[in-house]
Amino acid sequence: MTQWTEGTLFDNIDKFASALGYDNAGVILPLASISWDSPSDRDAFINMITNKPAVQGPQTDYMSHADQKVQVK
Amino acid sequence: MPAPQKPATTPSLPGKLSTRTDGGPASKQAVKRMTGMAYGQNQDFENTEASAPMAKATPVQAMTPSAIAGAAAKAATPAGPAGAMGAGGMALPSLTGPSQRPNEPVTTPAPQKPSVDPRIAENATLVQRYMPDLLAATSIPGAPDSYRQFVNYLARQAAPVLNAQAAPIQ
């Protein structure tokens, strides 16, 4: 079986799910289906819409990012 | 001599002074002159209006007070034929009728409807279509844990919705 490859459909799903939140599968799958020119282009798009770099990891909800922005020290 | 199909109208002369020759009412409205225009500037408007004359307006019949009262009484009838039935055939209450909830204070809030996240049903549809492929990808060597978590989350979240859809209708 082939190795997990950067830039494939499932890698795109992983990146968008981590960036947008697991509840937004209706947005994640269409975005992951786009034939991005390169993983860096895709990550730049994720960075643009979430204002955070694309990382793989646990669920990160974009709404919680918005909450963090308005926190006053 | 037959009567003309499109009789001429004479807006400047009312009633008996009209020069209409056909003996019947005009089928089109007469051109009305606009007032307040500077000298010589009304011709364009008249030409434009005359190029597409409006159909003769139906005269409005004034209602007598008894007719108005009869129409109001007909509309206030709960089992009226039209206008008194709401969606689904349920009779709408009258504005002036007695309260349908006499023992309920007017400040009682409306009952809360259960809020259902529409994304759950949407995710369930996606899971039904793509879950076999998504699951197969979890076994790819090197698949990140975050991807597996996402697939597990989708399957766990969509399971109740899919089970409800598969349940037989009673």
Image (cartoon, rainbow, N blue to C red):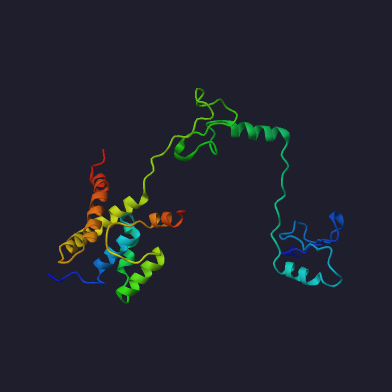
**Identity of the residue drawn at 26% across and 44% down:** B164
Against B152, is B116 above or below? Answer: above
**Identity of the residue drawn at 25% across and 57% down:** B150
Q: Nearer the viewer, residue A45 or B46?
A: A45
| Left or right: residue B104 compared with residue A44 | right
**Identity of the residue drawn at 21% across and 60% down:** B145
From the top left corner, tell me how far across and down residue B57 is, in percent.
Answer: 71, 54
| Left or right: residue B141 compared with residue B157 | left
Q: Nearer the viewer, residue A32 or B41?
A: A32
From the top left corner, tell me how far across and down residue B87 is, in percent.
Answer: 47, 40
Task: Name the image quarter holding residue B139.
Answer: bottom left
- Number of callouts: 0
From the top left corner, tell me how far across and down residue B140 is, in percent.
Answer: 16, 66
Which quadrant of the figure contains the N terminus of chain A?
bottom left
Against B107, is A71 above or below? Answer: below
**Identity of the residue drawn at 80% across and 63% down:** B34
> Residue at the left extreme?
A1
> Residue at the front extreme?
A73
Against B163, is A70 above or below? Answer: below
From the top left corner, tell me how far across and down residue A39 is, in percent.
Answer: 30, 73
